[in-house]
Image (spheres, helix red, strand yellow):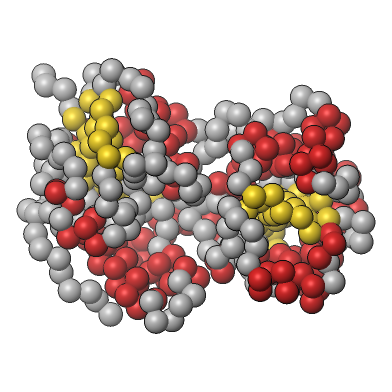
Amino acid sequence: MSRQRVVVDARYVRKRPSGTRTYVEALVHRFPKLAPSEDFHLWVHPEAPNPLVEAPNVTQEDVRAPANGPATLLYPHRLGDVRESDVFHATFNIVGFTLPCPIVTTIHDLSWWERPDLNEPNPFLRPFEYAFYNIGIRSALKRSNRILTVSKASAAKILELDPSVRDRLHVTHCSCGAEFVPPIDRGATRERAARLIGSEADYYLIVGWNPLGKGHDVALKAFAAGAPSEHHLVLVRRSAPPRDFIRTLAALGVEDRVHWVERAREDELIMLMQSALALLQPSRYEGFGIPVLEAMAVGCPVIASDIPALVEVMGGAGIHARVDDTDDLARAIAKVGVEPALRQELREHGLERRKAFSWDRTAAATLEAFREAAAEGPRHQASKAPAARA
């Protein structure tokens, strides 16, 4: 029996952090060990490590075309080597029209479909980007032998969009790395965090960049309204905050209590989570919410919005505030900040909840999807791009 050849589009693994990058990186490092009799060929971004994965059954090639660019839709068969491939794994929501082999697609969420305003603030660019994702997601639903998604919440949204995919749709949850664990010495870890931040004050933590979908604007207002005056806020960001962010801090009168850490290393992020009073995740939209799981894994209490994906991931192990409700979030911040017993209870529940998620299980389920897709053969012949639907 010949060896199965799987092409994995790993272009999201680059310098810029993202949940999709974490997902792809976790899987491609597990596939070779879990399936040593199968071959994996990775399409990688030029910024990715070379090699991204060191294993005898893995090869890779640079693909310079942007992941979310027109070439990915119009002529993906020209971007990299898909010859004699048994399966193509499209890892970031969209599928092109000219792939000649069976396809497994991971659709992380439908935010571009449901709430394009949260992804693109420019109203002139938004219709064009919406059309791109509209076409790409529709193509994925039509052409994919198997559709994977990262939460039951996302699966429900996909079925609302296209009920016909029910038999091809499978939930394969995200997880977090084994390095996300509670501190060995909480006091020493707290001292190191204080040096990194430049303050010994107790603090709440926000992780990630600041699109409207993450609700950081709500978090700032709720912190100003609800946090005790001796508590601070730390933001881990990719870059320095924009001017409107600074103006908001000044208007709220909390600029001297807010700190940011740019481009934190993973060990620094873990240290900041381990030492925080709580992680704030008041998202307006999520497919999963990996930072929430990472926080629970290190023993950090979590205060999050009540959107379906975060309720699913947290499983009762944190505190929820109504989405977009500044007052409700402020009350939750105040309560967690002044009740040590509550924080300890949340730590214990979070550590237990983390056990429900495993990258190894997700990788194994994904490999099974590859085998099922390969056995079926392509669903559709390669074709030209369809017109966008309104």
Which is more toward the observer, 257 or 291?
257
Placement of the C terminus among the 4 image quadrants: bottom left
**Horizontal and vertical percent position of residue 236:** 66, 51
Which is more toward the observer, 234 or 242?
242
Residue at 80 percent of width and 34 percent of height: 192
Residue at 59 percent of width and 33 percent of height: 355
In the image, taking residue 318 as reference, residue 371 lies left or right, namely left
Placement of the N terminus among the 4 image quadrants: top left
In the image, taking residue 278 as reference, residue 211 lies left or right, namely left
Query: How many tags in the picture?
Result: 0
Which is more toward the observer, 353 or 144?
144
**Horizontal and vertical percent position of residue 171:** 40, 46
Residue 357 seen in the current view: no
Q: Is residue 309 above or below residue 33?
A: below
**Horizontal and vertical percent position of residue 179:** 60, 29
Q: Is residue 280 above or below residue 272?
A: below
Residue at 19 percent of width and 42 percent of height: 80
Residue at 26 percent of width and 44 percent of height: 63
Displayed quadrant of residue 386: bottom left
In the image, taking residue 314 as reference, residue 33 lies left or right, namely left
Which is more toward the observer, 261 or 156?
261
Residue 78 seen in the current view: yes
